[in-house]
């Protein structure tokens, strides 16, 4: 059987840091393989009366804390927004968190999409195409900076790129990523994964060089085997604060361990 990772994305919203820290520890203690947060400045859902109002904490500061508060589990952002930080600085941040953790960071990155983040923090939102072009330009800069840093990352720092755009995003994944993260049904995931295979070949890489990760939505919980059959190496559950109910995590870990 193919090894499959169980990952959990803790949405860092509507919760105190003590809740988030406790949840990250629980995810590790239960035996999950990866814990993620996300890179936003406001809640994305469940706020009242405005959906984007409520407690929220910053991504990379939290990852630095997780580097110290966890011991064995891999962790990262699903995903960092390329627009929010200079790519040279972002590479340095990632290297530093990786070194602090002893080599457990997954460096997740994407082009960005949440307009309120941009507007409230003074970034130019622009267009989806412009943000993708910026990600495309940033990736070789990030890769080059990672090679120059002293000390370097601990081992091979895996780069995860999230998104499903077939013409640009998956091309960038095929060039630069070690892991691709996608969404949708098993059929959608399989379709986009096949397109990614083609982009890998065009970039002179074997498709097997890019692992596949997918968000496992509640409505698709019973389709874990179908995702694996479609090539998934990692299944990601999302949990919202402040409660971070671990029931689905236990269920998925039990499925993994019974394979």
Image (cartoon, grey):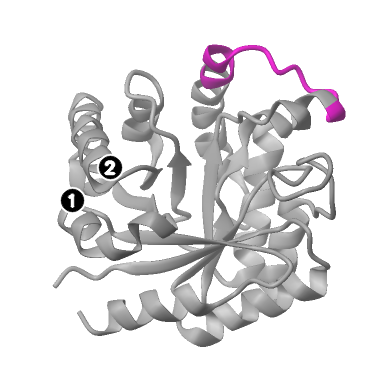
Q: Which mark is residue 189?
A: 2
Magenta span includes 131: yes
Magenta span includes 190: no
Q: Position of residue 240 (x, y in %)?
A: 64, 61
Q: Position of residue 184 (x, y in %)?
A: 35, 42
What residue appears at the point 46 percent right and 47 percent down from the top-left corner? 159
Q: Which mark is residue 38?
A: none
The image quadrant of residue 145 is: top right
Q: Position of residue 2 (x, y in %)?
A: 18, 68
Looking at the rendering, in which quadrant would you find the N terminus? bottom left
Mark 1 Cα within 10 Å, few/some/many (few <14, many 20+)? some
Query: In this rendering, is residue 192 above or below 71?
Result: above
The image quadrant of residue 116 is: top right
**Which region shows up in magenta?**
120-132
Mark 2 Cα within 10 Å, few/some/many (few <14, many 20+)? many
Q: Is residue 216 visible?
A: no
According to the picture, the residue beneath numbered tag 1 turns out to be 230
Query: In this rendering, is residue 234 above or below 27?
Result: above
The mark nearer the N terminus, 1 or 2, is 2
- Looking at the image, which residue sits at the far front? 49
Q: Nearer the viewer, residue 25 or 258?
A: 258
- Give the total number of marks visible in the rendering: 2
Q: Nearer the viewer, residue 154 or 53?
A: 53
Looking at the rendering, in which quadrant would you find the C terminus? bottom left
Contact? badges 1 and 2 (CB < 8 Å): yes
Q: Position of residue 92 (x, y in %)?
A: 67, 46
Q: What SS does tag 1 mark?
A: loop
């Amino acid at each position: 059987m193919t090894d499959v990772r169980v990952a959990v994305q803790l949405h860092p919203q509507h919760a105190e840091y003590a809740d988030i820290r406790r949840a990250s520890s629980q995810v590790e203690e239960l035996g999950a393989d990866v814990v993620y947060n996300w890179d936003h400045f406001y809640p994305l859902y469940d706020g009242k009366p405005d959906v984007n109002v409520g407690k929220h904490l910053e991504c990379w500061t939290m990852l630095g804390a997780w580097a110290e508060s966890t011991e064995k589990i891999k962790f990262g952002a699903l995903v960092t927004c390329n627009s929010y930080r200079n790519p040279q600085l972002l590479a340095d941040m990632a290297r530093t968190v990786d070194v602090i953790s002893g080599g457990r960071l997954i460096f997740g990155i994407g082009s960005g999409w949440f307009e309120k983040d941009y507007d409230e923090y003074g970034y130019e939102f622009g267009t989806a195409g412009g943000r993708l072009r910026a990600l495309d330009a940033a990736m070789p800069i990030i890769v080059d900076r990672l090679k120059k840093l002293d000390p370097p990352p601990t081992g091979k720092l895996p780069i995860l790129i999230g998104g499903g755009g077939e013409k640009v995003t998956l091309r960038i994944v095929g060039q630069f990523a070690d892991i691709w993260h996608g969404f949708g049904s098993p059929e959608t995931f399989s379709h986009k994964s096949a397109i990614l295979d083609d982009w890998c070949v065009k970039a002179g890489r074997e498709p097997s060089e890019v692992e596949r990760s997918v968000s496992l939505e509640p409505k698709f919980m019973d389709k874990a085997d179908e995702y694996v059959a479609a090539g998934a190496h990692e299944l990601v559950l999302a949990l919202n604060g402040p409660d971070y109910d671990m029931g689905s995590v236990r269920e998925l870990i039990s499925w993994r361990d019974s394979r």
